[in-house]
Amino acid sequence: MNQTMYSRLLRFLAARLTPGGEFGLHLTAGLALLVSAVAMFREIAEAVGEQDDVARFDVHLAEWFNTHAFEPLTTIMLAITHSHGIVGMSIASSLLALWFWRRKAQYWLLCVVIAAPGGMLINVLLKNVYARPRPMFEEPLLTLATYSFPSGHTAASTLFYGLIASYIVTTSPSWRRRCTAMVAAAIMVLLVAFSRVYLGAHYVSDVLGAMAYSAGWLAVCIAAVSTLRRRRLARRDE
């Protein structure tokens, strides 16, 4: 590699890792998360399709939870899962959009508008592509007629809490607040995911697959909107 090519490579890498600019660090991080999420989802989907050890573990764990369910945990899990259904998440997303609108955070508002409906559309498409039956029990805690993989509740919560955490991380100067936001978002997503597995609505791989694809979709939405914002700012400053 000659000196000219080496200098160009260094400039390219520096531009990709710089916080500012249209195609800087925000886009690089988004692409890295997207690639990781797609790779993870692919591995999970292949394991589900091949009915290997992962699928057998899914069935074993689902049966264990169904056998060992107890109160008041069942009631708590039902409350968590129902509050993160279509109605609950639609209301929550609308309130989040309204909050962004009142704060004049138009690009984050655009993220909500794109991420939530888009993520649910992807979920419906994936469910019909894989057509995985839900767990079956003699005495089910929750009965649903739709397909199992991936989990819609988990995907919706990942998008919703992930978006809130992303907003706080990118706008707050406090590292403590940033860390708190990420930990809180992770806890909420895990609670929703656990409620779906505990109640027998999904297998573990269903919720893991949902986390993977929704994290990738959220990365696409945030990176795209952020690039749009930076491009407009660059044009305005010209």
Image: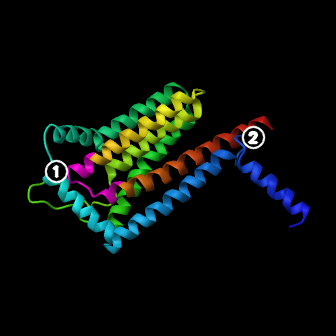
Which of the two residues, 131 or 112, is positioned nearer the viewer here? 131
233 on left or right of 59: right
Q: Image quarter for residue 44?
A: bottom left
Residue wearing tag 2: 235
Residue visible at 20% across and 49% down?
199
Mark 1 is on which residue type? Leu
Left or right: residue 102 versus residue 63 is right
Q: Within 10 angstroms of label 1, few (less than 14), some, or many (20 or more) residues?
A: few
Q: Which numbered disc covers residue 191? A: none
In front: 236, or 219? 219
Position of the C terminus, as image quadrant, is: top right
Magenta span: 195-207
Residue appearing at x 39%, y 31% in the figure: 95
- Residue 137, located in which quarter of the rendered image? bottom left
Task: Identify the residue position indicated by label 1 in the image.
Answer: 142
Residue placed at 52% from the left, 38% from the top? 166
Q: Residue at x 34, y 72 (%)?
A: 49
